[in-house]
């Protein structure tokens, strides 16, 4: 199990339950977060895992350096469910859960594959992950789907929210029906404000599943709504879904990373879809202090490898602009 989840400080606000975790010390008054793009463990990645090969190992040092690692899990982990009729559906055997539990501290499942195997598949997934890696952005009903994943560490309270706005709309949660948190503007903005005002979060980060696939630039909708979320109180906005990176921006000294692209995902012929970013972010009670992106290359098996010589966008509080820099790799550590 990932050391972050061993002993004491993480809250998951699903109903009244609380999950506890602890980790090695971080700099006083700050928390180190890592976010990955799309993770799909069907097809080749699933076959690789079934053979005992871990596709996350190339990022082991980056993950171990972090206080919390968050990914976008774009497949349904279940043995059951009825397949939804759509061009691509992704289903993964629950044997992958121990590996995910080892590396990750939370997943957003607000995406356009969460309903691939119907309500039964989603409910099974939620049950299978209970007591393991927390899931946010979907739930047994709309109220649960909209609840944030709360982190409390080093005196900093962080709220992570997940939303999907890409078809099929049938995957949206209802008042009494399971599904994903749909990106209704009024819901998203209200949830951000509630995280600030009611939950007293110092840092609020919506993780959005949005935009058009293979488009290298964000749409006007993404740009406008990202700024609206920051105006409502978001400390940063992070996106996924496009299968390519879509650039970054700074608004009111707060970062927007429109799409991280793919992380563990295979089946793409386009070179730009086989390149992605991992986002590293240090936050404190004032918000995002600094952030950078690690560029990686993805091989035909869907496994990412960091390219430490390739520059990615980065920034720091007070700069008000994007920098392009070669990120510093973490110190090498022995494998557990």
Image (cartoon, helix red, strand yellow):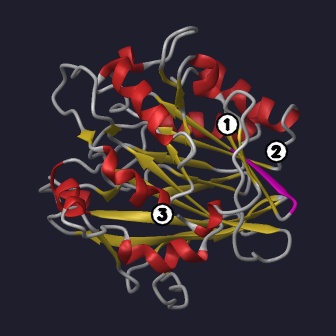
- The residues bearing labels 3 and 1 have C-alpha atoms spaced at a distance of 22 Å
Question: Which of labels 3 and 1 is toward the front?
Answer: 3
* Residue 216 seen in render: no
Quadrant position of residue 67:
bottom right
Tell me where residue 109 appears, x and y as whole percent: 46, 38
Tell me what residue is drawn at x 52 percent, y 11 percent. 174
Q: Is residue 91 shown in magenta?
A: no
- Residue farthest along the top direction in this orientation: 176
Please rate how many residues cluster around mark 2, counting C-alpha atoms within 10 Å: few if below 14, some from 14 to 19, many from 20. Answer: many
- The residues bearing labels 2 and 1 have C-alpha atoms spaced at a distance of 10 Å
Mark 3 — residue? 102
Tell me where residue 15 appears, x and y as whole percent: 70, 27
Please rate how many residues cluster around mark 1, counting C-alpha atoms within 10 Å: few if below 14, some from 14 to 19, many from 20. Answer: many
Q: Nearer the viewer, residue 243 or 55?
A: 55
* Residue 119 seen in render: yes
Mark 2–mark 1 contact, CB under 8 Å? yes
Tell me what residue is drawn at x 29 percent, y 41 percent. 213
Magenta span covers which residues?
155-159
Mark 2 — residue? 201
Mark 1 — residue? 148
**Sequence-wise first label, 2 or 3:** 3
Tell me where residue 144 appears, x and y as whole percent: 62, 24
Q: Main secondary structure of the magenta part?
A: strand
Please rate how many residues cluster around mark 3, counting C-alpha atoms within 10 Å: few if below 14, some from 14 to 19, many from 20. Answer: some
Q: Nearer the viewer, residue 261 or 42?
A: 42
């Amino acid at each position: 199990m990932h050391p972050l989840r061993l002993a004491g400080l993480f809250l998951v606000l699903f109903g009244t339950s609380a999950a506890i975790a602890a980790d090695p010390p971080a700099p006083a008054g700050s928390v180190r977060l890592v976010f990955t793009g799309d993770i799909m463990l069907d097809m080749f990645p699933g076959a690789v895992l079934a053979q005992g090969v871990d596709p996350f190992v190339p990022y082991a040092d980056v993950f171990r350096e972090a206080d919390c690692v968050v990914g976008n899990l774009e497949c349904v982990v279940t043995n059951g469910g009825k397949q939804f009729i759509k061009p691509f559906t992704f289903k993964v055997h629950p044997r992958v859960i121990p590996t995910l539990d080892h590396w990750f501290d939370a997943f957003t499942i607000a995406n356009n594959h969460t309903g691939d195997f119907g309500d039964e598949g989603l409910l099974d997934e939620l049950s299978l992950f209970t007591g393991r890696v927390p899931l946010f952005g979907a739930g047994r009903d709309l109220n649960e789907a909209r609840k944030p994943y709360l982190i409390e560490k080093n005196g900093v309270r962080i709220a992570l929210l997940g939303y999907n706005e890409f078809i099929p709309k049938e995957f949206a949660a209802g008042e009494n029906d399971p599904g994903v948190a749909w990106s209704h503007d009024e819901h998203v903005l209200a949830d951000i404000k509630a995280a600030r005002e009611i939950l007293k979060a110092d840092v609020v980060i919506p993780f959005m599943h949005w935009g058009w696939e293979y488009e290298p630039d964000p749409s006007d909708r993404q740009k406008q709504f990202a700024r609206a979320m920051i105006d409502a109180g978001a400390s940063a906005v992070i996106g996924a879904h496009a299968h390519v990176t879509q650039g970054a921006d700074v608004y009111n000294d707060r970062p927007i990373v429109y799409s991280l692209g793919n992380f563990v995902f295979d089946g793409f012929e386009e070179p730009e879809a086989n390149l992605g970013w991992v986002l590293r972010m240090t936050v404190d009670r004032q918000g995002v202090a600094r952030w950078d992106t690690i560029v990686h290359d993805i091989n035909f098996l869907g496994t990412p490898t960091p390219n430490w010589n390739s520059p990615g966008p980065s920034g720091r509080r007070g700069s008000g602009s994007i920098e392009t820099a070669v990120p510093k790799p973490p110190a090498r550590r022995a494998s557990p």
